[in-house]
Amino acid sequence: MRTVKAGDRDVDRCMTCGSLWFDFGEIRELTEGHVPIPSETAEPGTANTEGRAGLAPAELLRMHRESAKLSCPRCDGKLRAIDFQMTGVPVFLCLGCHGYLSPRRSAAAINARFQYIREHQEQYAALGEAMAAEFRRGMESRGMPVPRGSRPRAQIPLPILVPLGDDAPALQSFPFVTYLLIGLSVVLYLYFQISGALPRLPGGVPGIPAGGGLGAVPAAAVLASPLVHGGLVPLLAGALFLFVLGDDVEDRIGPIPFLFLYLVCGAAAGVAHLLWGQPGHPAALGSAGAVGGILGAYLIFFPQVSIKMYGLGRLASVPAYLFACAWILAALLIGPGLLTNFINPAPLSFAGNVAGFGIGACLAAIWRSLEAAMERPRS
């Protein structure tokens, strides 16, 4: 090992293999870009790819097997291979002193991943300002006092938040179910528009009543609600979530589990709307809860992937976890209003949105745990 300067600290680098040792708390110097990464550490043309998508899943399995033969260079304790901060980049963690041993490829991947975040700090700051402005607007709409000088300088042109693209890894299979769900939603919307009839769910109900209780509508109506939209904008928004995020989730878990995920999240959102929605609000239609579940699953599977988005009057490119935070705040803060009611005449309640998102994230976490268990070597 040889000591190298990293910001205001010294870290150890192996002169033979290029691995880095970080005492407890020192790995922050790597994520903040203070650790010098030699040009030969990252293979040509691979640093950006590894930084965005992480290393191959087989790398974690290989390091897990290797950890049985290694010991901590600091305290001689046991090492364990872990996924560093859910980035898809494996490193060794000492269970005794909690230091990190990072192979050279892992160090290069972590540096590239967090370099992207550092380079886009201005966009994150702009998104934070927009979210704060929307928070103030929500306070004003509810008659709550707003501190002087905090009035937003510009109005939000469209009170929606949607993904426009992402930097996820290339698909390995055709997203059949994703396009099927989009197609069914479009066909049903066109049918009601052409026939001139108001959108109806099974049982003849116009939507899921807020706070109506479990017996207010048939179970079939709750399952079908994500496919029936009350307006063109919520239809397009739901289609964008499926087109941009849904295909990656389907590619990760397969078509049948993806269809199950979509239906369960939509049903959970409908039940939450029935139980905890505010009575008197419009009956809900649309895929907001179901695509919220897709977003929750996407957050578990691809937390650091960059998402190009429109939201709160701005175009930005942010990691998936920031997009999820913005989506939840938008669901909470964008309240009733003339423009909002015109864009989406049948909105889902905040309880429904959060329920769909939460169920999607939980199911994805279970799936990810099963993947890890299947990859774990048998003793």
Image (tube, rainbow, N blue to C red):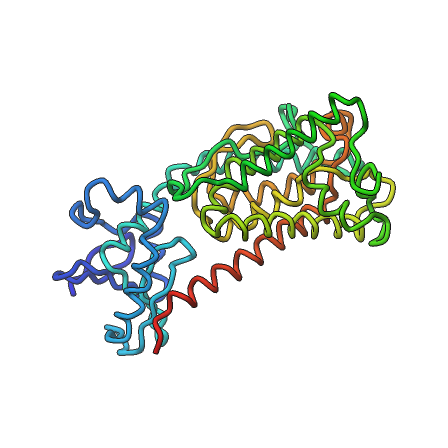
Q: Is 212 on the left-hand or right-hand side of 27?
A: right
Q: Is 78 on the left-hand or right-hand side of 185?
A: left
Q: On the rendered image, what quadrant is the C terminus found in?
A: bottom left
Q: Is 325 on the left-hand or right-hand side of 116?
A: right
Q: Position of residue 319 (x, y in %)?
A: 46, 42
Which quadrant of the view contains residue 159?
A: top right
What is the tally of numbered marks visible in this picture? 0
Q: Position of residue 354 (x, y in %)?
A: 67, 49
Which quadrant of the view contains residue 14?
A: bottom left
Q: Is 27 on the left-hand or right-hand side of 361?
A: left
Q: Position of residue 224 (x, y in %)?
A: 72, 43
What residue do we see at 64% from left, 45% from top? 290
Q: Height in image: 289 above or below 315?
A: below
Q: Nearer the viewer, residue 347 or 97?
A: 347
Whether residue 100 can be seen here: yes
Extreme residue in the left direction: 16
What residue do we see at 82% from left, 36% from top? 206
Q: Nearer the viewer, residue 131 or 213?
A: 213
Q: On the rendered image, what quadrant is the N terminus found in?
A: bottom left
Q: Height in image: 71 above or below 259?
A: below
Q: Position of residue 301 (x, y in %)?
A: 47, 51
Whether residue 149 can be seen here: no
What residue do we see at 27% from left, 74% from top? 72
Q: Height in image: 317 above or below 115?
A: above
